[in-house]
Image: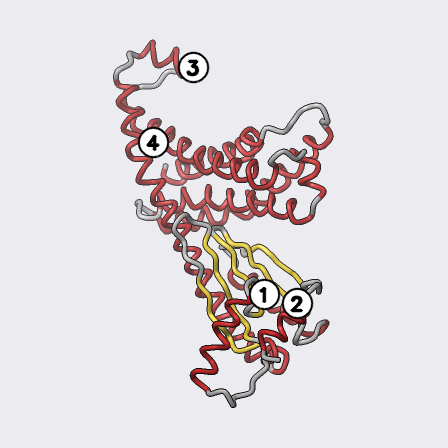
Amino acid sequence: MDIQEKLAAKYDNIAIYTAGFYADPEDELGTRSKLSETLKSFTMNQHADTPFSLQIMTTNGEINVMPLGLLSLDELKAYETKRREEAGLSADDDSIPLVVQFAPHTEKGQVQKQIVDSTQALFADFNTQFAKIWAVVKADLQVNQNLLVTMERDLIADSVDVQSEYQNNFKMMDAATRKSKLGFELADEDLGHFSAYMADMHEIQAIVLSAAAFVKHELLGDDLFAQVMNDKVSRNTLFWVLDNTFYETLYYFIEKNRETTNGDKLVKHLHHQKKLLIINMRNDAYQRAQAALDDTTTRIDMDKYFSDIFVPIAEQLAREVDQFQD
């Protein structure tokens, strides 16, 4: 029986040990600690041939640490064929390769995989193998961060055109018409600043509605919101999307103002504000979710749910930028 047959026999009708956590893009040390604790717990409580998958959710993708072949035995077959070609048929090695896989959640993203020795090696020498695993995970986290920044810069580039459109529309209005449309007076000298603010809110709304659409189509579907909240995986995914939306909102303002006057200090200020903002966001999201569960007569409006949570956060971040620059 070769390694593929052994793995197939082991995984057939056997529960897979799973664990996972969210990688805070602001806390690399925390991510490293969670990864170490999770893998250490696995090695202390399971056997080297136990099928497992450790999932690390990121802002723009997911990282999985698992035995090669867990998702597709064809991958293991190809690996085994190549190994025999290189080492010869007499080379006997029934260890199961350990793979770190990064799957970006982007339209043209390519799944990246890197083999890091084997599950047996992880059990035999945890500290040495963990250092190797963390090096790959850390590199994948940087790729993920680059994807986040690229997405934000695309939105910022779009905001320039949106701002111009707003400003041109406002210029065509007289003072009375502006007041009628906006509900307050807008002086000519304030057109540029207010148009930039409106463009920012336009881009934030794009982030928010995209997140809401994902939840509607991938989690909610035809189910009731209570079914989503009662399912551990779906509930965790919802709160992962909420955290993602928060960081996409935060980093929009960080990237837009990074190169401005005193940009370094402003970015540090926004990072500092993040600590309280994300706690308040999670509490607000949870309370709104509970209110939706208590209301059994109304189907939850995800667009409104996400907008009510994140538009005020975006408005506060915009105020923080204005106050800092003033």
* Residue nearest the viewer, comparing 292 with 71: 71
Q: Earlier in the sequence, mark 2 or mark 1?
A: 2
Residue at 72% of width from left, 72% of height from top?
Answer: 45
Q: CA distance from mark 1 to mark 4?
A: 49 Å
Report the mark closest to the observer, 1 or 4: 1
Type of amino acid under label 1: Leu
Which quarter of the figure is the C terminus placed in?
A: top left
Q: Nearer the viewer, residue 243 or 180?
A: 243
| Image coordinates for residue 171, horizontal then vertical, percent | 26, 19
Instruction: State the image quarter where residue 15 is shown.
Output: bottom right
Q: CA distance from mark 4 to mark 3?
A: 18 Å
Mark 3 Cα within 10 Å, few/some/many (few <14, many 20+)? few
Q: Which SS class for mark 4?
A: helix
Q: Nearer the viewer, residue 57 or 309?
A: 57
Q: Which of the two discs, 1 and 3, sits closer to the camera?
A: 1
Please tell me in which quadrant of the rendered image residue 127 appears.
bottom right
The residue carrying mark 2 is 11
Which residue appears at 56% of the width and 41% of the height?
A: 218
Q: Are marks 2 and 1 in contact (CB under 8 Å)?
A: yes
* CA neighbours of label 2 inside 10 A, class few (<14), some (14 to 19), many (20+): some
Where does residue 258 sit, x and y in percent of width and height? 35, 48
Residue hosting label 1: 70
Mark 3 vs mark 2, CA separation in Å:
64 Å
Disc 1, disc 4: CB below 8 Å? no
Q: Residue at x 70, y 35 (%)?
A: 290
Tag of residue 183: 3
Above or below, comparing residue 132 to residue 256 in the picture:
below
